[in-house]
Image (tube, rainbow, N blue to C red):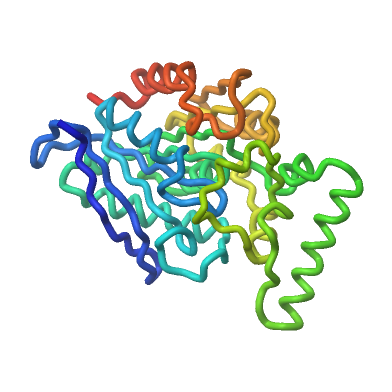
Amino acid sequence: MERMEQQVVISSDGLKLSGVVSLPEGVKPGEKLPAFLVLHGFGSNKNAGNVKIPCKMLNDWGYATLRFDMRSCGDSEGEFGHITCMDQVADTRNAVTFMQSHPNVDASRIGLLGSSFGAAVALYAGSVDPRVGCIVSSGGWGNGERKFRGQHPTPEAWAKFTAMLDEGRRYKAQHGKPMPVNRYDIVPIPEHMRHHVLEKSVLEFTSDTAISMFEFKPEEVIHQFAPRPLLLLHSSVDSVTPTEQSLGVFAHAGKPKDLHLFNETDHFMFAESMPRVRTVVKDWLDVYFPARA
């Protein structure tokens, strides 16, 4: 038997979001399962490897999953590429509402798993939404300004990046609309890792996106998530998001919390299907958010 997949439409602030609910094989009508929303990364979509692979992993372990395109991404409504962090927090919370009404989901047991940008959104959304039961964050970040300083580390790179933010503010004031910005001018990714960026991913954002990320600070609200369980995963040497970002979130979070650093993988660890990552996540879930309560 194969797991069941259902194409769904999620309503979020008047926009229609495209999603897929997946159920484990053999689930019975009306059977209530714990569920995870699996959040995609920066300008990506629900078909990314670090979304589909963890969905299958979670289905295999007995969880229902929802993967969906945030507004302005993939097949969802919204101005393509015009992305803000708080809009994605709203989309996530509305997706929780959607999953609570699913006939095969235990409405009291819904977790968030996110990668990169999606992990930062998960950290914030979970902290401000008491319905979220646990968070698994992979390669996430907690302080946008500090993250960008690590991604644009030289004085020259930092001056160029902050000049772009200032130019974006002036452009919007003058033209009444945000300035277009290349994705790699916002978040640099080494050439050898760009194959992880899907063909239908957003390649041109607006300056509002970069400003939103600069101002986004999940570490300032993560203390509100306790006493719900938090698992932070990060590469020990991350080529995209500085490892210190998960360290900062860990320092600000309450208990229970766990942080695991992996030296054999890089930023897209779920897409790389690392066995040790799977083992760590499974063992942690068995303790803090088991498929069978």
Q: Looking at the image, which is closer to me, 270 or 66?
A: 270
Residue that appears at 35% across and 29% down: 57
Q: Is residue 255 left or right of residue 206?
A: left
Question: In the rendered view, would you say 43 is above or below 166?
Answer: above
Q: Is residue 287 left or right of residue 146?
A: left
Q: Is residue 1 left or right of residue 122?
A: left
Residue that appears at 48% across and 40% down: 114
Q: Looking at the image, which is closer to me, 49 or 34?
A: 49
Question: In the rendered view, would you say 191 is above or below 88?
Answer: above
Please provide percent x and percent y for residue 287: 36, 18
Question: In the rendered view, would you say 259 is above or below 100?
Answer: above
Question: In the rendered view, would you say 252 is above or below 13?
Answer: above
- Taking the view exactly as shown, the residue that stands out farthest to the left is 29
Which quadrant would the N terminus be assigned to in this image? top left
Please provide percent x and percent y for residue 175: 72, 83
Please provide percent x and percent y for residue 275: 45, 18
Count of numbered marks: 0
- Taking the view exactly as shown, the residue that stands out farthest to the right is 155
